[in-house]
Amino acid sequence: MNRKAIITWLLIIFILPVVYGQKYGTDSLRCVENLSLYKINFRMWKDYNFSQEVIDQVPVYQPWKWVFENCPLSSQNIYVDGVVIMKYFFENETDSARKDQLVDSIMLVYDKRIEYFGNTSSSREGLVLGRKGIDLLILRPERFHEVYQILDRSVVLEGNKSTGPVLVYYFHSTINSARAGLIDSSLIVENFDKIMGIVDFNEKQNQEKEQERTEWQGIRLNIESLFEPFATCPDLISIYKKKFEQTPDDPELLREIVKMLDKRDCGNDPFYFDIIVKLYDLEPDPESAYLIGRMLYRKNEYSKAVEYLLQATDMADTNSRADCFLLLADTYRNLRDFPRSRSFAYKCAELRPNDGNPYIMIGDLYATSASDCGSDEISKKAAYWAAVDKYLKARSVDPSVEQVANERISSYSRAFPPMERLFFHDLKEGDSYTVGCWINETTTIRAAR
């Protein structure tokens, strides 16, 4: 017998039984028998959509349990299928104590999967812990702190490979644990920062894959909405300053910072202004010009604001352009350039015909100009007629401004000339009247009530 043949026989006699025994346990024949039986029967369960009649006649649990306890290395599917089997029993169980036992059994199946197959990519510890934590939160929401501990470990191990659902459930459990006083509330901010770093990574990795990118954008919105009640301006600025210092030339990050700080009304912080100026330097487009113009407006630097807002009127988005026109109208109002203010208010109304705010603004312009647009007691009050016309228009196109419009109508109607003064000037209610000055608009004569 040659040397190769001798080695082959030695493997058969000494090595293979050891390996076979490790996989199938001490009673390998019975293991293989039960493994085959549970697999065939479980496939039948699924084929018949877990029909109760089939489940009653086709045994799965006993052969599965024998394999699980006696030859745990025989197949990774023991653990994948085991979770499904236990969940079926859980969903169809009415006794609460028994349901608790089944949840614990599910958790044990996950733990054993890690123990015996944790060195494989499909059963690596972080991945399996993620699924374990999600199942526990769904089946037993009151065990949220245990979930937090499981998913915290999962995210540490998986890092950027963490799945979107794991991140959402992780943040849910973080918030619940903090509310219960089981972890420091500062971890809400810390974990938000950590999670959003993973989301950022995956969004960039999937730029060319529309479905994946959309899914990650949905995860971002979900987590941001969860974080919103807890986000204070100092917390957000602390988070985003670190990100900004790491990648100061990333326009996508800068837009994200602006969006989040806008949501929380943090626009008065100097950091906010630094970000929008940097964004404009990197991408001097209409959108970034609008952000600078709006910031200067908030700082009452109206002349500077106009320079940027005029650049922003070319924004592609119709609603954003309408916002810009309305802001320009108010900026020119503050500069007391009423004709330009009215012009931009009308531009906004053209783009948003159901928005009453442009008409409220024009009415305010007319009311402010009243005493400057006349030479006698009638002409000095005529602008109030034109102002009320605009408030009536605002109310008619936009129910949301009805209260504001009514308050102004009530206030300025009291400033109309009294009936005797109209009679003295040979004017009659209901007749037309052209208001002079820059207003130059025809209105209807009305008396104070």
Image: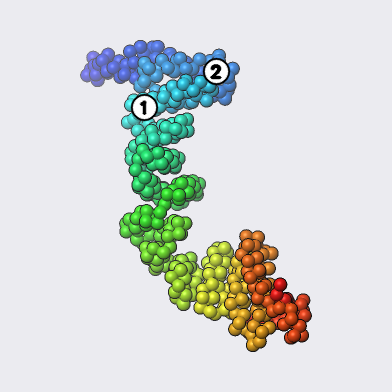
How much space separates mark 2 and mark 1, taking CA atoms?
26 Å
In depth, the one of 395 and 321 nearer the eye is: 395
Q: Is residue 358 above or below residue 82?
A: below
Q: Compare residues 401 and 259 and report the one nearer the observer.
A: 401
Q: Residue at image x 64%, y 83%?
A: 380
Residue topped by disc 2: 55
Q: Residue 308's spot in the image, x, y percent?
A: 47, 72
Q: Quadrant of the N terminus?
A: top left
Amino acid carrying mark 1 in the image: Asp
Quarter of the figure with residue 120:
top left
Q: Residue at x 54, y 72 (%)?
A: 330
Residue placed at 58% from the left, 21% from the top? 51
Q: Residue 274 sits in which quadrant?
A: bottom left
Q: Residue at x 51, y 20 (%)?
A: 95
Q: Are marks 2 and 1 in contact (CB under 8 Å)?
A: no
Question: Within 10 angstroms of label 1, few (less than 14), some, or many (20 or more) residues?
Answer: some
